[in-house]
Amino acid sequence: MLKGERCFTPKCGVERRSAPPGQQVQRRRKVSDRGIQLREKQKARYIYGLLERQFRKTFREAERRPGKTGENLLQLLETRFDSIVLQLGFADSRAQARQIVRHGHLTVNGKRANIPSMRLNAGDTIGWREGSKKSEYFKELVETIKSKSSPDWLSVDKENISGRVISLPTGEDFQPTFDESVIIAYYSR
């Protein structure tokens, strides 16, 4: 391993010592509650690709709506145009979904839309522009869309490569990788 034969004997330095070889660093302090809250908020921001001002504005809107603030926040984040494009399977990552939207390849209810932060409502349909159907990406998407799945609150027409928002997502539709209650505590100071 490190020094050849020596690591197979009882004199192996790695097994005798609790710390790895090399200069030892100071022990880290325990992360405070505020630090944990900040880390969760940053994680949510990075997942959805939002800047601080956008995220704060979304949180304030979630706070104003009736119901649970955490569920409202997740609902607002999930009903963004770029998030729905990702959920429908039109893109492999949020950055790619955002780029597809920004380049104007998609339509919402038959009209060209190029704003990733646009909120979609129940009944909205998402389709591809005629000019964009000639692109190489669209041709690859036709082949790969058949193996992708979408959540229950969205429907995908795999023949026409279009999607529809059936209803707004509810609590059981979310599987966040962050704790929204910690984010609420962060903004409730």
Image (cartoon, helix red, strand yellow):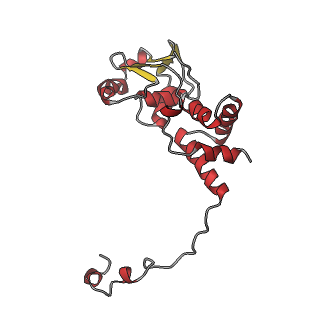
Residue visible at 48% across and 39% down in the picture = 175
Q: Position of residue 166 (x, y in %)?
A: 48, 19
Q: Answer with the quarter of the image where residue 151 lies.
A: top left
Name above or below for residue 139 compared with residue 63: above
Residue 9 or 68: which is nearer the viewer? 68
Residue at image point 49% right, 27% down: 84
* Depth order, front residue of 189/141: 189
Q: Position of residue 115 (x, y in %)?
A: 57, 25
Picture layout, residue 184 above or below residue 32 = above
The relative height of residue 53 versus residue 154 in the rendered view (above or below) is below
From the viewer's perspective, is 187 left or right of 169?
Answer: right
Q: Residue at x 66, y 43 (%)?
A: 184
Q: Quadrant of residue 4?
A: bottom left
Q: Give left or right: position of 101 versus 11.
A: right
Pinpoint residue 18: horizontal percent, then vertical percent: 44, 79
Residue at 50% x, 44% y is 177
Q: Position of residue 108 (x, y in %)?
A: 51, 17
